[in-house]
Image (cartoon, rainbow, N blue to C red):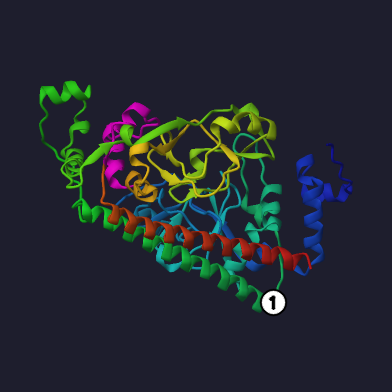
Amino acid sequence: MSQISKIKYSDILEAQRFDAEYFKPEYLKMYNLLKKKEHLLFEDVAFITDGIHSSIDFDDKSNILLFSAKAPKENFFDTSGLGFISKEQHNKNPRTALQAGDVIISTVGTIGNCATVTEDLLPANSDRHVGIIRPNSISSYFISTFLLSKYGRMQSQRNTVGNVQPNLYIKDMKGFIMPMFSGSFQVKVEKMVKNAHQKKNQSKKLYQEAEELLLSELGLLYYAPKQSLAFSATKKDVAEAERFDAEYFQPKYAEIIEKIEKYKGGYDTVANIFSRKKGVEVGSEAYVDKGKDFIRVSDFSEQGIENSGKKISEKVFEELREKHQPKKGEILYTKDGTIGRSYLVKDEINGILSGAFLRLNLKKEYKDFEKEALVLILNSVLCRSQVDQLSGGALIAHLKPSDFESFRIPLLSKSLQEKIARKITESHQLRKESRELLEKAKRMVEEEIEK
């Protein structure tokens, strides 16, 4: 349905934008509401800059995190994929060095994601794909929550430019409207976000305890793999593996396989434990602005599915849902992209999985095996090392299902399965409560604006 916005010529001159996207009716409605409220511009309430523009000198030994656009999510950071910047380059770039209380916002990729830096993340620096917002007096947590609300998201989306590589520029962020609310309201929002972070940290602790139970059972709790410079493999080993590269035969892989194969409870292979189905590719022509989720690896982690960046129409969804909609109780496993991530589906997913996923179901003889324990095994070093061995030391983009089916899985005792499952279940519940608190904080900000 066509939409028409009536705007003044002076508005066009002020914005220096002539594209219809910038003046969409829904954007104008929210923008005009913000302007009616007591407000300041972002440049009046914070110092705003971006990260290092030059090439990054990475150094895994520095312990100084380098924040990129993939780190900020919705009021929390995912640091699992971040690298470390060299101490020398960090010291040469004090402008971009992060401080506690900085709000970091992604300016490429999933534009508009943001979170507040805490002491435990420091020292850290940042690249040019993030914006750094350093508030003068307003609560950092309130700013990040506002930016994640529909009124903050609107301003990020409205000011994003570029088709091939969309970007949100610092100069445009400085002109964002920041509604002014009482200090007590800001504190209320901040407390809610911090409470959410506490629950998230408790969730991580329980998950770690479950991992320790698993690794301790296999004698791998303090295992540190070593890269051997000299080792041997027999002609038979080479022939059976159909591999001739030295990395494949590194002893560190054999050590973990041996732990599994000699486990007192025995082991079995993925092929014997699971039946599997693959996801599907729809093609970029099937993408729409609004619709059902089309879930890709980038939308997925061991904690579940984040907000999907791609949508498909209701029509395409209905055509595919019978065969390709994930079902509650299935285990999802990534075979492409970031390989080896696994998650147990707990709630209905209104979307379709891309072809990068396998959907796993337990075979009859293993129907009583605790699924959360199996998911932990798939996500642990026990199976990750089997992925690494196949990769030959490089980043592979694809894991053949036939190779995955050969993975060994230790058959844990029922009592240990249940202990692990309880901790994982409680961990997921706390994470869910954390997400709900963050959503509640956003709604609270939106409702205050709409009063």
Residue receiving disc 1: 182
Number of numbered discs on residues: 1
Residue 62 on image: x %, y %: 31, 55
Which secondary structure, mark 1?
loop
Left or right, 60 with reference to 361 = left
Q: Residue drawn at (84%, 40%), measured in percent from left and top?
A: 3
Q: Is residue 400 visible?
A: no
Q: Residues within 10 Å of mark 1 (few under 14, many from 20)?
A: few
Q: In this rendering, is residue 180 above or below 225? A: below
Q: Is residue 401 magenta?
A: yes
Residue 10 covered by magenta stretch: no
Seen at 37% across and 30% down, the residue is 399
Q: Residue 395, position in %: x, y? A: 35, 35
**What is the span of residues highlighted in magenta in the rendered image?**
380-409
Say which residue appears at 64% left-offset and 62% top-offset: 442
Picture layout, residue 187 above or below residue 260: below
- Residue 274 shows in the view: yes
From the top left corner, tell me how far across and down residue 240 is, in percent: 19, 23
Q: Quadrant of the C terminus?
A: bottom right
Q: Residue lying at the far bottom in this picture: please name it.
A: 184
Amino acid type at mark 1: Ser
- Report the side of 143 relative to 251 (left or right): right
Q: Quadrant of the N terminus?
A: top right
Foreground residue among 9 and 196: 196
